[in-house]
Image (tube, rainbow, N blue to C red):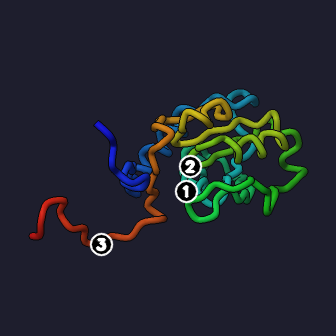
């Protein structure tokens, strides 16, 4: 049997509650794993998707130093070459030792590969991981298939959807 669904129809819809629960689970998994007697020096969110999970993890792990690295690797839903638009504080980052870099998802791994090249000793964590990008992640919570599109709550709006068969 052939799968006739469009790529966006094989979707994994994430609610705000779910991203919060999964981000807290990520924090619990990372608790005590930092190089400084289990502590982390800082959290760096990969913007934009990593901002909510990084904020939640920073709160749960009581990390007060938070920065961002802005990487563009998508043009709408099409993957493009990853490029850094804004880097975090160089003095804070060093080679990445003690730094927790967080993103919402690793897909192809190109974004994390780019960031890892800059900060080879950082710890890379994502909430969700796809198989192609999995080798770039040190810690993650949920793996999804490569052909699944994840719909995050910050990309969605509530609206009526017609039933599959007929009308109401």
Mark 3 neighbour density, 10 Å: few (under 14) some (14–19) many (20 or more): few
Give left or right: position of 136 versus 145.
Answer: right
Residue 86 x %, y %:
80, 62
Mark 1 and mark 3: span between their CA atoms? 23 Å
Q: Nearer the viewer, residue 50 or 40?
A: 50
Residue 94 x %, y %:
88, 43
Circle 3 is placed at which residue position? 159
Mark 3 and mark 2: span between their CA atoms? 24 Å
Lower position in the chain sequence, tag 2 or tag 1: 1
Q: What's the residue at 69%, 41% (across, down)?
A: 100
Circle 1 is placed at which residue position? 52
Q: What's the residue at 11%, 70% (across, down)?
A: 167
Circle 2 is placed at which residue position? 104
| Mark 2 touches mark 1? (CB < 8 Å) | yes
Mark 1 neighbour density, 10 Å: few (under 14) some (14–19) many (20 or more): many
Indicate whether 123 appears above or below 47: above
Q: Nearer the viewer, residue 91 or 22?
A: 22
Indicate whether 107 appears above or below 31: below
Q: Is label 2 in a helix, a strand or a loop?
A: strand
Which one is in front in this view, the residue at disc 2 or the one at disc 1?
2
Lower position in the chain sequence, tag 1 or tag 3: 1
Question: What label does residue 134 carry, if any?
Answer: none
């Amino acid at each position: 049997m052939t799968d006739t669904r469009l790529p966006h129809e094989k979707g994994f819809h994430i609610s705000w509650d779910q991203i919060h629960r999964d981000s807290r689970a990520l924090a619990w998994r990372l608790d005590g794993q930092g190089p400084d007697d289990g502590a982390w020096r800082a959290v760096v969110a990969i913007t934009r998707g990593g901002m909510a999970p990084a904020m939640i993890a920073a709160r749960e792990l009581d990390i007060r130093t938070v920065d961002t690295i802005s990487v563009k690797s998508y043009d709408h839903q099409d993957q493009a070459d990853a490029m850094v638009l804004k880097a975090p504080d160089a003095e804070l980052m060093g080679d990445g030792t003690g730094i927790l870099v967080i993103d919402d998802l690793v897909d192809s791994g190109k974004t994390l590969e780019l960031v890892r090249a800059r900060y080879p000793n950082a710890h890379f964590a994502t909430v969700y991981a796809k198989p192609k990008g999995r080798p770039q992640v040190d810690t993650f919570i949920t793996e999804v298939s490569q052909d699944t599109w994840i719909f995050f709550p910050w990309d969605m709006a509530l609206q009526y959807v017609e039933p599959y068969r007929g009308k109401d």
